[in-house]
């Protein structure tokens, strides 16, 4: 089967999952990034203020990860099966990291003697979640071996050099997104602290991109066929580099909204670049959208049960939360 044979419902649910992944990366990405940055300061006032700038949002942001998992399970069960087989340990680490950072977030506010433990738990949990997401992405870029709809690789294939590099890259990218969010929401000394870290993070992200590109070219580890055959897709990596340059400019000019907005644009450009590389595959480079889709009656039932009711409610909830808590955060009330 080819992508052209995919039904409208299959394409709809592929689009929903792609959109949910993007929303998760941007929304949970900034609060994971704040968690990564959390461990780089010893100032108690900074740490408390960093908690306040994400307090109204962080748990709702993770809802989009549930949409991705449930959508794959219901609409593309073969992709769900292969993905869990290939990334059993990363998914386990992801869940443990999410649980531990959630517990640490709540417990540190009520702890005195054990607060340092929960502080490091929040930072470590955030870093682990970001790293395993990036490592899984790098493993997907290399290609996942599949035969007869089953994963045929080893449980530690995701620990190859390229996935480890993309894991580090996503940790740094989320940290940059988190620094932009702190600048957007915080005031005073914490805002200045975050501004000072943006140039370093931009440089680190660029360094990882250069290393990843060099490894890709020299080793041929990552297939580049779609980018070679779709030269128009090269505009998106260029857009991403321009967005990083704009992030640096916004930090130098102290424009509070620019670093976060342009870092989001960088992630969007990177995401579309991956779409150009992967399409029409959902499991690169073996299972397409058409071949992975559930039967039409299942997709139709899912459309009326979730596509018309649940997803709009979630979108409205997310928009309302960000509208209600817009503007600079005020310590003590979460906004």
Image (cartoon, rainbow, N blue to C red):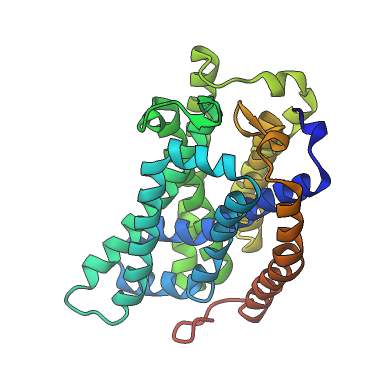
Of residue 141 and residue 152, the one placed in the foreground of this image is 152
Picture quadrant of residue 10: top right
Total labels: the figure holds 0
Residue 126 vertical position relative to residue 306 in the rendered view, above or below:
above
In the rendered view, does 276 fall on the left or right side of 25?
right
Q: Measuring 63% from the left and 77% from the top, which residue is drawn there?
A: 321
| Residue with the most extreme left position | 113
Residue 260 vertical position relative to residue 140 in the rendered view, above or below:
below
In the rendered view, does 127 fall on the left or right side of 255?
left
Residue 319 visible? The answer is yes
| Position in image of residue 88 (x %, y %) | 39, 42
Q: Measuring 76% from the left and 19% from the top, which residue is drawn there?
A: 229
Task: Name the quadrant of the C terminus.
Answer: bottom right
Residue 42 visible? The answer is no
In the rendered view, does 227 fall on the left or right side of 248?
right
| Residue with the most extreme bottom position | 333
| Position in image of residue 117 (x %, y %) | 22, 66
Of residue 110 and residue 141, the one placed in the foreground of this image is 141
Task: Name the quadrant of the N terminus.
Answer: top right
Q: Measuring 78% from the left and 38% from the top, which residue is drawn there?
A: 6
Q: Measuring 69% from the left and 42% from the top, which residue is drawn there?
A: 293
| Position in image of residue 125 (x %, y %) | 35, 57
| Position in image of residue 167 (x %, y %) | 43, 39
């Amino acid at each position: 089967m080819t992508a052209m044979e995919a039904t409208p419902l299959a394409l709809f649910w592929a689009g929903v999952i792609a959109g949910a992944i993007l929303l998760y990366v941007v929304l949970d990405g900034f609060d994971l990034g704040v968690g990564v940055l959390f461990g780089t300061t010893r100032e108690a006032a900074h740490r408390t203020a960093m908690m306040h700038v994400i307090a109204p949002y962080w748990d709702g942001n993770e809802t989009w990860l549930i949409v991705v998992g449930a959508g794959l399970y219901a609409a593309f069960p073969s992709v769900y099966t292969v993905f869990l087989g290939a990334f059993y340990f990363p998914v386990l680490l992801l869940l443990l990291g999410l649980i531990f950072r959630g517990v640490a977030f709540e417990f540190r506010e009520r702890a005195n003697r054990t607060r340092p433990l929960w502080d490091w738990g929040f930072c470590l949990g955030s870093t682990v979640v970001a790293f395993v997401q990036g490592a899984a992405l790098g493993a997907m870029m290399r290609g996942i071996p599949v035969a007869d709809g089953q994963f045929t690789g080893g449980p530690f294939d995701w620990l190859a050099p390229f996935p480890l590099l993309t894991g580090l890259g996503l940790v740094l990218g989320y940290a940059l997104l988190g620094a932009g969010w702190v600048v957007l929401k915080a005031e005073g000394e914490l805002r200045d602290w975050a501004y000072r870290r943006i140039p370093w993070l931009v440089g680190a992200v660029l360094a990882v991109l250069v290393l990843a590109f060099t490894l890709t070219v020299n080793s041929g580890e990552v297939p580049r066929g779609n980018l070679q055959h779709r030269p128009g897709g090269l505009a998106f990596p260029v857009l991403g580099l321009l967005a990083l340059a704009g992030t640096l400019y916004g930090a130098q000019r102290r424009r509070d909204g620019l670093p976060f907005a342009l870092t989001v644009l960088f992630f969007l450009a990177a995401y579309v670049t991956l779409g150009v590389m992967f399409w029409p595959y959902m499991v690169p480079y073996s299972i397409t959208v058409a071949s992975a889709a559930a039967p039409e009656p299942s997709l139709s039932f899912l459309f009326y049960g979730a596509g018309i009711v649940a997803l709009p409610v979630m979108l409205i909830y997310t928009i309302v939360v960000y509208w209600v808590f817009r503007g600079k955060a005020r310590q003590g009330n979460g906004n």
